[in-house]
Image (spheres, helix red, strand yellow):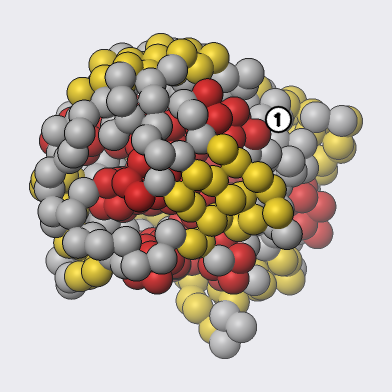
């Protein structure tokens, strides 16, 4: 099993290019199920989750041509088998996104209940509630969602809570439904907007993406299209947090600053000097960061996927940070690993109290989920001595060549067996 060996204490200097967004690429790949024409995608990140989704879609009947330049062509001339088996779904929660398009395209689907990172309860009840409102019959049997519908019908759906994958699944399904679907309390994330752009290029009629109310007028069929996946705002934020923790000056090209208002605001509060261009961000940090408190919230609030990275930043900051997690109920597992490095962290329910220390000490630590892995890497960059991060298969799910990119900035980091 691979590990990352990090020798900390060196500031970051230089430039790296941001990859395409994992959380945009996965639902957009599922859009290929809605048409018999090819869907051509650019800026697709090379990640384990992308490979898992391609494998799942391949079993269903999608031919995926992945190319060296980061592009991908998906073609679904026919649905071979509308089934998403447990063996694939258990490793990646986004697999549930095949449910809506399969129902819309062929009137049936058998999808395992999802897995993914162990970061608390993430039910799919909003997905099922919405699809049932559109006329689907769904039964949970032996760990699978068995769904049927002759043709989905438009409906007004008020979601009980904001859910990104729920919003995306219902958008995909509604694109081929009969009539108009209105999603209220919809997710506003940039990845939702990117999916809407792709569907619109395929011929879908969608209004309001990026707001809390999305209106989809169903069409009889969708065509192929060419679409470029947006930059990954979480990868961008991770490099920004790493630079703020380690110090130095870093330029991130191919980024999307407009999607990072909350993150950039907190970094400026921490003492970083930040400048932006339409597709680039530069950050400079001299000395220790100031402690900043934060509370995670749905977009445009502070992203839960950046919480672990900012906890690592707070570990060596001046002062005390209060970090409150409101999205998931089990997303402080990295706090215990950061304590192994010498961090002063006290957990009080949904809040972590982080008192910054002057320095961390290298140690062996274990990644517990995707973003926790990134937090531990950042902590390793500033710790004295050697840090060994185990179970980095989590990291490979969502970061493309993280050690290579950090190495290009001067970090002493290598992948070891």
Residue 407, horizontal then vertical, whole percent:
39, 67
Q: Nearer the viewer, residue 211 or 138?
A: 138
Residue at image location 73% in from the left, 66% down from the top: 365
Position of residue 273 relative to residue 363, above or below, is above
Residue 394 can be seen, yes or no: no
Residue at image location 77% in from the left, 57% down from the top: 337
| Residue 174 position by quadrant | top left
Tell me how many marks there are.
1
| Residue 49 position by quadrant | bottom left
Q: Nearer the viewer, residue 357 or 401?
A: 401
Residue 328 can be seen, yes or no: yes
On the picture, is 164 further left or further right than 74? right
Name of the residue lying farthest toward the bottom:
417
On the picture, is 400 further left or further right than 43? right
Q: Which residue is mark 1?
A: 325
Quadrant of the image for the N terminus? bottom right
Residue at image location 20% in from the left, 70% down from the top: 65
Quadrant of the image for the C terminus? bottom right
Residue 399, horizontal then vertical, whole percent:
43, 58
Residue at image location 40% in from the left, 32% down from the top: 152
| Residue 7 position by quadrant | bottom right
């Amino acid at each position: 099993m691979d590990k990352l060996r990090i020798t900390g204490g060196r500031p970051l200097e230089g430039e790296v290019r941001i990859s395409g967004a994992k959380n945009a690429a996965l639902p957009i790949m599922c859009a290929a199920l809605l048409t018999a024409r090819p869907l051509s995608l650019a800026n697709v990140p090379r990640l384990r989750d992308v490979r898992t989704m391609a494998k799942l879609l391949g079993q269903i009947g999608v031919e995926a041509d992945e190319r060296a330049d980061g592009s991908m062509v998906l073609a679904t001339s026919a649905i071979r088998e509308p089934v998403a088996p447990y063996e694939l779904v258990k490793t990646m929660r986004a697999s549930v996104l095949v449910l809506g398009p399969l129902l819309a395209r062929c009137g049936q689907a058998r999808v395992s209940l999802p897995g993914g990172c162990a970061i608390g309860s993430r039910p799919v009840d909003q997905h099922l509630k919405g699809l049932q409102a559109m006329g689907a019959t769904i039964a949970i049997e032996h760990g699978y969602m068995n769904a049927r519908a002759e043709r989905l019908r438009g409906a007004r759906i008020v979601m009980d809570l904001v859910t990104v994958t729920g919003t995306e699944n219902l958008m995909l399904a509604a694109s081929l439904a009969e009539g108009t679907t209105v999603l209220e309390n919809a997710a506003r994330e940039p990845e939702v907007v990117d999916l809407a752009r792709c569907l619109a290029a395929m011929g879908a009629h969608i209004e309001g993406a990026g707001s809390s109310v999305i209106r989809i007028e169903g069409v009889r069929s969708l065509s192929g299209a060419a679409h470029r996946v947006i930059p990954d705002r979480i990868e961008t934020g991770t490099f920004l947090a790493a630079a703020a923790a380690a110090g130095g000056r870093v330029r991130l090209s191919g980024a999307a600053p407009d999607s990072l208002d909350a993150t950039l605001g907190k970094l400026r509060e921490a003492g970083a000097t930040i400048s932006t261009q339409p597709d680039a961000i530069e950050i400079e940090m001299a000395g220790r960061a100031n402690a900043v408190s934060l509370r995670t919230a749905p977009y445009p609030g502070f992203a839960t996927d950046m919480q672990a990275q900012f906890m690592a930043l707070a570990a060596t900051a001046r002062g005390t940070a209060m970090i409150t997690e409101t999205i998931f109920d089990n997303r402080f597992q990295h706090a215990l690993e950061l304590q192994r490095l010498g961090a002063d962290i006290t957990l009080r329910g949904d809040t972590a109290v982080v008192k910054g220390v002057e320095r961390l000490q290298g140690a062996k630590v274990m990644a517990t989920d995707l973003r926790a892995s990134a937090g531990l890497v950042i902590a390793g960059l500033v710790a004295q001595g050697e840090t060994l991060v185990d179970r980095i298969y989590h990291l490979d799910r969502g970061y493309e060549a993280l050690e290579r990119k950090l190495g290009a900035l001067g970090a002493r980091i290598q992948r070891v067996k």
